[in-house]
Amino acid sequence: GLGKLKKKHRDARMGRNPATGESISIPAKTVVKFTVAKAAKDAIL
């Protein structure tokens, strides 16, 4: 296969609106993380 898909939890954090400079709260969420398999990486490089 090409790699693995894993669920990763991201904690809540403070961010900034680049247009206004206003601080905003970014809520906690679960994201999908892709890790490339060693065999696929070796085949490309």
Image: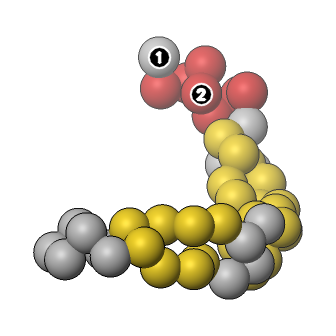
**What residue is shown with label 1?**
45
Helix, strand or loop under label 1: loop
For residue 7, side relative to residue 41 (left or right) = right
Mark 2 and mark 1 in contact? Answer it, CB < 8 Å: yes
Closest to the observer, 37 or 6: 6
Secondary structure found at label 2: helix
Q: Is residue 35 above or below residue 42?
A: below
Residue drawn at point x = 59 percent, y = 27 percent: 41
Q: Relative to 36, is 11 on the left or the right?
A: right
Which of the 4 image quadrants contains residue 43? top right
Above or below residue 9? Residue 26 is below
Q: Amino acid at mark 2?
A: Lys
Q: For this rendering, which residue is in front, 9 or 1?
A: 9
Tell whether 2 sits left or right of 9.
left
Does the image show residue 32? no
Front-lying residue, 12 or 20:
20
Residue 41 image label: 2
Q: Residues within 10 Å of mark 1 (few under 14, many from 20)?
A: few
Going by the numbered disc 1, the residue's amino acid type is: Leu
